[in-house]
């Protein structure tokens, strides 16, 4: 099941900001008139989560952002959303600024007085795709989540009915499974069929292929200085050069390894331990790089040698001796990656980190904070949105864009069972670059309170969080990209709170369900889809009842 996460950022006319907020509040009241968003659920059945937020800022004009997480492609979703009663999207767009690019005429057609031009094409044109995203309960459609929860309620009612416990407690585990399935199958005929795969073969191949391609391209880019030097220098001179540069750059980086006064946080995370745990993957990546780069470079080297020979440059023989075999040069370039490129990048990064400013006590708007608190903890789920400035600089830009791309691809591999590592609270979350990559947006739909949600990240994923958010202006001081940073729990939470905005409209298709409960429902349904379970399997299945 394909799931889509996106957002639509629109700049707001400053004089219309208050009116826009009022319109969003009115849409929320109309859509939630019965307390269950029945109109939205009926007209947009594929929608998991949706929010509308207005981000005020002193650096820019206000920004209106519509965020959505749904099943399928964007086109049908936008058409369904526009058709939903009470979704006066055209009025919202009239409070937003006319884009200065090619979408300006489309904006005019949509917002002019008395216009009946569909809004969906404009929203689709202004859509911003995420740089990193996570889908909790991946592969479960909204309809399947609701159906399996209905099944869970039916199982609970059955086991709490008049025959229980006198009847069901006397049955063996396998017989209990048969009895429950027999009682529920007539009213849930979909249990007779196989469950659709949560992740298709095509998705699996795509996830792994994209990650492998990213790793190989990154290694090629990082090893390119070594590749060039190894091609034009004798190998002994080349190795001597990269060893000397490694000692110089590595020594300078080691000299600057200490954290700034008062910013070091002792954690159990060790980068060396992480790399050691990934030794098999790193070895496979190196072997794959040598093979792929050799296949790529060999035709180029051969062609260059032939051209030089044809033009009579007199260098074909000597160049051929230098460039052959290509595999040896590529292997030498790996040493350049480790001993030349990485130490230089680490040194430059550490120099920037030591010069960064940070917010010890970010300013928060008390009224906005009260509005946020008033809208949270009404159900098992909550929502947050954050928008921060990104630190300038070419190195920062390369690191954050490449880091987000790699992190997003890695999450598609490691977060496949409904959970984000050891964290079991995140439904949908994503980052996105806005305003020509000058700002970083973050949205998340999660279980339990905002404070406990961030505590979960700080304790279990501070390294990844620092990598994803560390280039934000005012972020707590980092060290070597993944140390400290988000580990400054209180300071990080204050910084994140200051960057938040009120989610004036927030819709969840299943607000009472946690990530854990959804996975529990799926396991119960999977057991009931099978005609017969052995006693051992049935006993394990009963643990979720």
Image: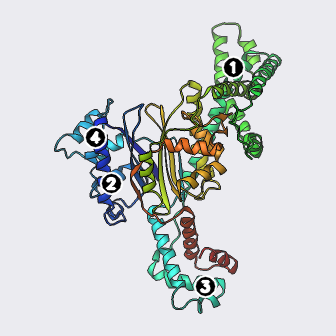
Residue 263, image x and y in percent?
A: 68, 36
In the image, residue 28 above or below residue 433: below
Q: Which residue is mark 1?
A: 228
Q: Residue at x 60, y 32 (%)?
A: 399
Q: Which residue is mark 2?
A: 81
Looking at the rendered structure, which numbered label has been put on residue 95? 4
Q: Which structural element holds mark 3?
A: helix
**CA gap, disc 1 and disc 4:** 54 Å
**CA gap, disc 3 and disc 4:** 60 Å
Q: Which residue is mark 3?
A: 176
Residue at the left extreme, as displayed = 114
In the image, residue 320 above or below residue 543: above
Residue 366, image x and y in percent?
A: 44, 45
Q: Residue at x 51, y 64 (%)?
A: 196
Mark before the other along the chain sequence, 4 or 2: 2
Mark before the other along the chain sequence, 1 or 4: 4
Q: Nearer the viewer, mark 4 or mark 2?
A: 4
Residue neighbourhood size for the residue with mark 2, other residues' Cα within 10 Å, grouped as few (<14), some (14–19), many (≥20): many
Pointer 1 and pointer 4: residues touching (CB < 8 Å)?
no
Which one is nearer the viewer's eye here, 452 or 544? 452
**CA gap, disc 2 and disc 1:** 54 Å
Q: Nearer the viewer, mark 1 or mark 4?
A: 4
């Amino acid at each position: 099941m394909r799931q889509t996460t996106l957002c639509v950022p629109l700049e707001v006319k400053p004089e219309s900001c208050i009116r826009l907020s009022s319109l969003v509040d009115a849409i929320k009241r109309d859509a939630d008139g019965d307390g269950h968003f029945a109109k939205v659920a009926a007209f947009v059945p594929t929608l998991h989560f949706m929010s509308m937020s207005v981000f005020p800022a002193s650096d820019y004009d206000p920004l209106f952002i519509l965020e959505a997480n749904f099943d399928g492609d964007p086109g049908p979703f936008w058409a369904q959303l526009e058709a939903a009663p009470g979704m006066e999207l055209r009025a919202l767009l009239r409070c937003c600024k006319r884009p200065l690019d090619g979408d300006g005429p489309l904006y005019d057609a949509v917002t002019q007085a008395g216009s009946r031009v569909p809004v969906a094409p404009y929203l689709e044109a202004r859509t911003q795709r995420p740089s990193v995203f996570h889908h909790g309960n991946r592969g479960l459609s909204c309809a399947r989540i609701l159906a399996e929860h209905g099944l869970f309620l039916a199982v609970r009612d059955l086991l709490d009915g008049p025959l229980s416990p006198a009847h069901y407690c006397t049955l063996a585990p396998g017989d209990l499974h048969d009895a429950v399935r027999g009682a529920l199958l007539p009213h849930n005929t979909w249990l007779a069929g196989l469950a659709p795969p949560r992740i298709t073969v095509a998705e699996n191949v795509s996830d792994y292929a994209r990650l492998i391609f990213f790793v190989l391209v990154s290694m090629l880019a990082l090893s390119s200085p070594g590749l060039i030097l190894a091609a034009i220098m004798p190998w002994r001179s080349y190795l001597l050069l990269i060893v000397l540069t490694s000692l110089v750059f590595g020594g300078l980086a080691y000299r600057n390894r200490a954290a700034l006064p008062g910013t070091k946080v002792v954690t159990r995370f060790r980068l060396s331990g992480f790399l050691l745990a990934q030794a098999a993957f790193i070895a496979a990546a190196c072997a794959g790089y040598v093979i792929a780069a050799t296949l790529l470079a060999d035709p180029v080297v051969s062609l260059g040698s032939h051209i030089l020979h044809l033009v009579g440059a007199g260098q074909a023989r000597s160049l051929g001796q230098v460039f052959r075999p290509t595999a040896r040069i590529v292997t030498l370039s790996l040493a350049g990656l480790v001993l030349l490129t990485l130490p230089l990048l680490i040194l430059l990064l550490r120099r920037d980190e030591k010069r960064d400013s940070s917010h010890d006590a970010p300013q928060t708007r008390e009224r906005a904070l009260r509005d946020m608190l008033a809208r949270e903890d009404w159900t098992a789920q909550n929502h947050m949105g954050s928008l921060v400035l990104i630190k300038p600089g070419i190195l920062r830009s390369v690191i954050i864009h490449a880091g987000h791309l790699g992190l997003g691809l890695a999450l598609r591999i490691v977060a496949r069972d409904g959970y984000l590592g050891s964290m079991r609270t995140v439904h949908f979350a994503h980052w996105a670059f806005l305003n020509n990559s000058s700002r970083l947006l973050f949205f998340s739909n999660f279980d339990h309170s905002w404070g406990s949600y961030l505590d979960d990240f700080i304790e279990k994923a501070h390294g990844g969080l620092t990598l994803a958010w560390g280039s934000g202006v005012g972020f707590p001081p980092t060290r070597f990209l993944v140390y400290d940073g988000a580990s400054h729990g209180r300071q990080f939470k204050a910084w994140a709170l200051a960057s938040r905005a009120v989610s004036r409209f927030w819709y969840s298709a299943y607000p009472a369900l946690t990530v854990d409960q959804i996975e529990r429902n799926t396991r119960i349904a999977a057991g009931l889809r099978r005609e017969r379970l052995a006693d051992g399997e049935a006993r394990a299945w009963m643990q979720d009842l």
